[in-house]
Amino acid sequence: MSETHLILPVPAAEPFVGAHRASFDPSARAGMPAHITVLGPFIERGALSRDDLSALGELFAATAPIEFELARVARFEHALYLEPEPCEPFVELTQAVWRRWPGQPPYGGAHREIVPHLTIAVGAEDFHEVRAALERHLPLRAAAREAWLIALRSDERWVVHRRFLLAAR
């Protein structure tokens, strides 16, 4: 079995956040790209059925690409992140996936509120220099055009298991 997540990769952010993420976000060092999470953890890879994959394909095909800006640097207790604006399309997408798979709550049920974000740094430190470096590039225009089902391999590396286009017009 391996853990899976549904994410929206944000390749436009990589030139600005890649080095910071590589230094301060363990998931980046394990192969996780700059992204906004749709739902994670999701179904264990070995438990995913053809029906699950088909339903994901249909759900994402019925979703329009999301145009947004990474507008500001914000902070959770132990993470620095970029906040997308508007955030509502991300929340709605997470809720749609959760409605289809009600046994898979966002964040594994650890948090009540869905807060779309692109994690930059994990830890208790303030990351003042990282914040200042990022703020010079904001707002950053981006688009989510596909969703990825990613899986954590036994060697603790994230790999893309499936890609789904956001295809609604």
Image (tube, helix red, strand yellow):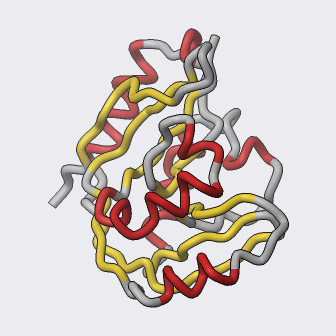
Q: Residue 114 or 37: which is nearer the viewer?
A: 37
Residue 159: image quadrant is top left
Q: Residue 125 or 152: which is nearer the viewer?
A: 125
Q: Tell me what residue is drawn at x 45 percent, y 65 percent.
A: 17
Residue 2: image quadrant is top right
Q: Tell me what residue is drawn at x 56 percent, y 35 percent.
A: 30
Q: Tell me what residue is drawn at x 84 percent, y 66 percent.
A: 124
Residue 11: image quadrant is bottom left
- Which part of the image, by quadrant, shows the N terminus? top right
Q: From the viewer's perspective, is 164 left or right of 72?
A: left
Percent position (x, y) of residue 18? 44, 58
- Which part of the image, by quadrant, shows the C terminus? bottom left
Q: Tell me what residue is drawn at x 51 percent, y 30 percent.
A: 158
Percent position (x, y) of residue 21? 54, 57
Percent position (x, y) of residue 65? 26, 60
Picture layout, residue 75 above or below residue 152:
below
